[in-house]
Amino acid sequence: SQQGEEDPQALSIQEGENATMNCSYKTSINNLQWYRQNSGRGLVHLILIRSNEREKHSGRLRVTLDTSKKSSSLLITASRAADTASYFCATVPYNQGGKLIFGQGTELSVKP
Amino acid sequence: DVKVTQSSRYLVKRTGEKVFLECVQDMDHENMFWYRQDPGLGLRLIYFSYDVKMKEKGDIPEGYSVSREKKERFSLILESASTNQTSMYLCASTAPGLAGGLSYEQYFGPGTRLTVT
């Protein structure tokens, strides 16, 4: 069953702008993770936020988590053409053996 | 540097063939996973393993089996390939979490794009 739903499905911005992607989920979670996938490649882990955390930063990435709304957002600041990729949120629900459940992803295009 | 490798980037097989997809990790991780990725459906978990000779069904195990004879190697087997198994297959591994769960970040291989004709 799908856990994470992402919004928007596709996003196109200019270099230097900020990109915001959202993820909603249905059940209680242990943590939530964001991954990036360049075209036709494997996924790369970006950042993990635990259920007791509200915000986390890593370089140009900022992730927020609102467990009351069951939602998360990923903000990429000062985007670059190299940020063009698909971005996936993945949740680790409680009581499901620690599996990662992925959303369908947001396709980000950053134009130079 | 962390590394997960998959035996082929591209594979073309005929309907009814037995197909083996191999995944090897060099991080001494206990936990390994097989996903398939299809447009509009995201990543779906086929099988996972948290130890040698152990396996657990994921969300879509039908038509697949797995083998984990050594810690570093996790194989996905399509017993009789069908056209609806045409997909991108991704392998991943992770160390167990602090509580022994599977909460840590997963490391992915580059993927195998399988076409069944």
Image: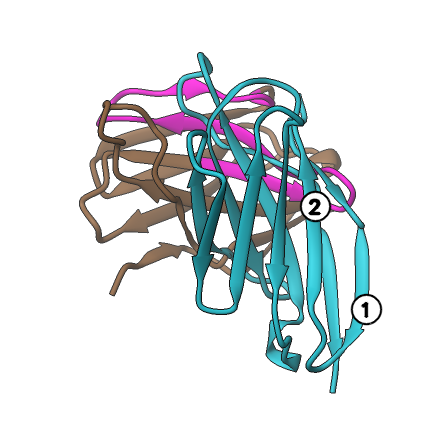
Q: Quadrant of residue B85?
A: top right
Q: Report the residue marked by disc 1.
A: A12
Position above or below: A111 against A65? below
Span colored in magenta: B34-61
Element carrying mark 1? strand
Residue at numbered disc 2: A22
In the image, what residue occupies the spot 72% across and 53% down? Answer: A106
Which one is nearer the viewer's eye here, B82 or A5? A5
Look at the numbered discs 2 and 1 and tell me whether their residues touch, using CB distance below 8 Å.
Answer: no
Q: CA distance from mark 2 to mark 1?
A: 15 Å
Quarter-of-image position of residue A103: top right
* Residue A73: percent from left, percent from top: 63, 47
Total count of labels = 2
Q: Colour of chain A?
A: cyan
Q: Is residue A100 visible?
A: yes
Residue displayed at 56% across by 45% down: A64
Say above or below: B55 vs B8.
above
Residue B14 can be seen, yes or no: no
Q: Is residue B39 magenta?
A: yes
Chain coloured brown in this rendering:
B
Is residue B24 within the magenta segment? no
The residue type indicated by label 1 comes to Ser
Q: Chain of mark 1?
A: A
In which image quadrant can residue A81 be found?
bottom right
Residue positioned 51% across, 69% down in the render: A60
Q: State the residue in front, B108 or B73.
A: B108
Q: Which chain contains the residue that carries disc 2?
A: A
Q: Is residue B35 left or right of residue A18?
A: left
On the same chain, marks 2 and 1? The answer is yes
